[in-house]
């Protein structure tokens, strides 16, 4: 018998180009660390678990009754494939709620269900963006939008922000500059108007209105990412940019159940009909449909329970926000922080330009059981920055002295302990 010795060798895969220059999400990477003081990804820490236990009990009892009465097929369909756009009953519940809370003149046919609003972001980019197409957004920006945009070959142009979010005048100047320099009108303007990720800033009414007018004048789609719309701490609720879109032609309005319900990975959105047709087609290629049974669970929640539990959820997050900003002010070295009126995050910037928050995280914070997200993660890899002082585009220089600090997951006690510890460590590092 002849024995052939086989040599193991690594398979040579010809990966797509994007895999070589777009790294793993910094937030996904940091989730691997198990620390006591977790201020990293925006994990909800206040979830109405008793309510969902009631819903599951209610749903299971009704299904058992249906089976006993010979309606097993009805129950089977609740565990089966469903329409790509989402099941009709759930879309009707959400359309009713959006008519009430956001004053949107819509029906169930205007609502799209996706596997998280993240899938909707990706699908919109996938159907609109060809390599070289221009997108305008903020600096910093939600990395779950900017990374797929660059993956698909977009030229990302960032405009500066202040403590009230994006500056519409800079957006218009950047649009005109893009047309002059690249012979390309931007395809998309992406914003998070309510307590944005990562800075936590909220756009005032006039900026929302002006931004819509600019998009309307230049025939550009606005993606309004309203992930934190229900998590607002004041009595005044600003109108969504979508409310200016009387004919449903200009704004894709994205909402998510993750912050206001639980992380079931279900998003819901309203967008121009022609765009929705292509996004539904794209979603069919991505996952066929969102799980029917999860939509059934959430349909009960939004119809019967959300308004009963949401006030306490928001109150709990406000307490955590208050604890965090108070402790930062008490213990951190000199720097600037945002003052979020909702959402999940505080953005902090050291006055010392030489401070590197990523190196500090790896070398000092994580060994001391603390995790946050370094601010550099929230910038495009190959983006341009519009400089209002020179009216020119420049290669984006990413600041290293910033961090996004999450307050939604840890309890107030853990926030107090962890932020005071982080502040003491920062003072030793930054002199």
Image (cartoon, rainbow, N blue to C red):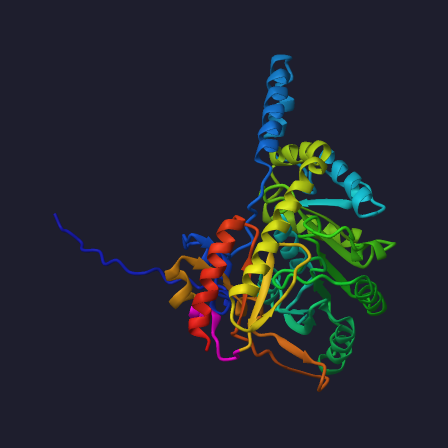
State whether residue 196 is above or below residue 95.
below
Residue 250 sits in quarter:
bottom right
In percent of width and height, residue 185 lies at 76, 73
State whether residue 190 is above or below residue 120.
below
Q: Is residue 88 magenta?
A: no
Q: Is residue 353 magenta?
A: yes
Q: Nearer the viewer, residue 182 or 407?
A: 407
- Most extreme residue toward the bottom is 390
Question: Is any atom of residue 80 visible in this view?
Answer: no
In percent of width and height, residue 258 lies at 61, 46
Q: Is residue 202 left or right of residue 142?
A: right
Q: Nearer the viewer, residue 25 or 101?
A: 101
Q: Nearer the viewer, residue 129 or 293?
A: 293
Kindly identify the residue that appears in the image at 78 percent across and 63 percent down: 204
Q: Is residue 304 left or right of residue 394?
A: right
Residue 214 sits in quarter:
bottom right
In percent of width and height, residue 68 lies at 61, 13
- Most extreme residue toward the top is 69
Please state the extent of the stretch shown in magenta in the rendering: 352-360
Kindly identify the residue that appears in the image at 15 percent across and 51 percent down: 3
- Most extreme residue toward the front is 330
> Total number of numbered labels?
0
Kindly identify the residue that appears in the image at 73 percent across and 75 percent down: 184
Question: Is any atom of residue 315 visible in this view?
Answer: yes
Kindly identify the residue that appears in the image at 59 percent across and 49 percent down: 286
In percent of width and height, residue 385 lies at 65, 77
């Amino acid at each position: 018998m002849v024995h052939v010795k086989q040599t193991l060798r690594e398979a040579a895969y010809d990966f797509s180009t994007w895999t070589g220059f777009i790294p793993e999400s910094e937030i996904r990477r940091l989730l691997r660390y198990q620390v006591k003081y977790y201020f990293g990804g925006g994990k909800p820490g206040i979830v109405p678990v008793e309510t969902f236990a009631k819903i599951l009990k209610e749903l299971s009892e009704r299904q058992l009754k249906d089976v006993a009465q010979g309606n097993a097929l009805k129950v089977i369909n609740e565990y089966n494939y469903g329409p790509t756009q989402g099941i009709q009953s759930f879309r009707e519940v959400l359309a009713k709620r959006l008519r009430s809370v956001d004053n949107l003149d819509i029906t169930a046919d205007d609502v799209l269900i996706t596997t998280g609003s993240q899938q909707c972001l990706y699908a919109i980019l996938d159907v609109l963006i060809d390599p070289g197409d221009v997108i305008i957004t903020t600096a910093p920006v939600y990395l779950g939008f900017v990374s797929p945009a660059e993956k698909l070959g977009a030229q990302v142009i960032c405009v500066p922000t202040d403590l009230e979010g994006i500056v519409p005048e800079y957006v218009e100047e950047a649009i005109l500059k893009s047309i002059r320099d690249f012979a390309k009108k931007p395809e998309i303007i992406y914003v998070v108007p309510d307590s944005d990720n990562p800075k936590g800033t909220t756009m005032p009414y006039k900026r929302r209105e002006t931004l819509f007018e600019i998009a309307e004048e230049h025939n550009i789609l606005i993606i309004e990412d309203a992930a934190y719309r229900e998590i607002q701490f004041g009595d005044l609720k600003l109108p969504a940019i979508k409310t200016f879109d009387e004919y449903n032609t200009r704004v894709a309005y994205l909402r998510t159940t993750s912050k206001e319900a639980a992380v079931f990975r279900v998003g819901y959105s309203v967008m121009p009909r022609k765009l929705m047709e292509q996004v539904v087609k794209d979603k069919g290629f991505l996952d066929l449909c969102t799980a029917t049974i999860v939509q059934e669970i959430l349909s009960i929640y939004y119809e019967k329970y959300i308004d009963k539990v949401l006030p306490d959820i928001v109150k709990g997050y406000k307490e955590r926000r208050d604890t965090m900003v108070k402790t930062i002010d008490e213990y951190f070295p000199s720097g600037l922080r945002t003052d979020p009126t909702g959402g999940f995050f505080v953005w902090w910037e050291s006055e010392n330009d030489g401070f590197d928050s990523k190196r500090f995280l790896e070398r000092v914070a994580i060994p001391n059981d603390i995790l946050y997200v370094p601010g550099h993660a929230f910038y495009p890899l190959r983006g341009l920055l519009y400089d209002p002082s020179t009216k020119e585009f420049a290669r984006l220089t990413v600041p290293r002295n910033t961090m996004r600090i999450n307050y939604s997951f840890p309890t107030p006690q853990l926030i107090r302990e962890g932020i005071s510890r982080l502040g003491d460590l920062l003072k030793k590092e930054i002199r």
